[in-house]
Amino acid sequence: MDAFTELCVEMLSPLGPVRVRRMFGGQGVYVDGLFMALIDDGQLFLKADDLTRERFVAAGCPPFTYPTKVGERMVMSYYRPPEEALESPPLMLPWARLALEAALRAANAKVKIQVKKAPAPRTAAKKAARSAPDQPAAKKPAAKKAAPRAR
């Protein structure tokens, strides 16, 4: 782990256990298992969403961008914290909390979508049985006969 990554881990550790994983030429930063930051090209970018983006923009924080195959710049919902926030964990804490809150909202939204998409197996089986009344009901397997007792 390079020195800048170690500094980022130190700055974010007041929020909980920090884990860093390599991804897409950079690094993903997880706190308590939530993906909340990127480290790319020696820069830390914190996750933002519709509720937190304005705070980053108002502080003059630039977003994370990357070039697409057609030469355009893709803007992501990750923003650099203010420069002074990298000076100490207490200065980073409010920005890191915003990122963790955005990560938590994103994770909760994914769970809700997955719950809505996956019908319960019984419900699906009942619907299938109701939609095909012409077909005979499946027979139950015959019960095994007991072996005759020796006398």
Image (cartoon, rainbow, N blue to C red):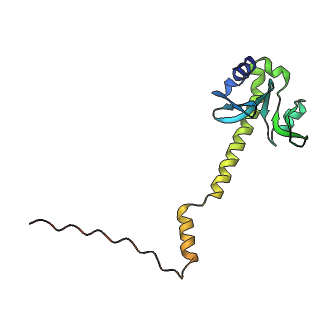
Residue 45 percent across, percent down from the top left: 79, 30
Note whether 72 is above or below 117 in the view shown.
above
* Residue sitting at x 11%, y 65%: 150
> Does 99 sit left or right of 66 as displayed?
left
- Total marks in image: 0
Residue 132 at x, y percent in the picture: 56, 78
The residue located at (81%, 35%) in the rendering is 78
Percent coordinates x, y for residue 2 in the rendering: 72, 19
Quarter of the image with the C terminus is bottom left
Position of 46 with respect to 9 (left or right) is right
Image quadrant where residue 105 sits? top right
Work out which residue is located at the far front of the displayed protein and give it. Answer: 69
- At x 61%, y 58%, the residue is 118
Estimate the x, y position of residue 123 in percent, counting from the top left: 56, 66
Q: Name, please, the residue furthest toward the bottom.
A: 134
Quarter of the image where the N terminus is located: top right
- Quadrant hosting residue 101: top right
Q: Please state which of residues 95 and 72 is positioned toward the viewer in this rendering.
A: 72
Vertical arrangement, residue 11 with respect to residue 151, above or below: above
Tell me, yes or no, if residue 141 can be seen here.
yes
Name the quadrant containing residue 115. Answer: bottom right
Is residue 16 at least partly visible in the picture?
A: no
Which residue corresponds to the image point at 31% horizontal and 70% vertical from the top-left? 143
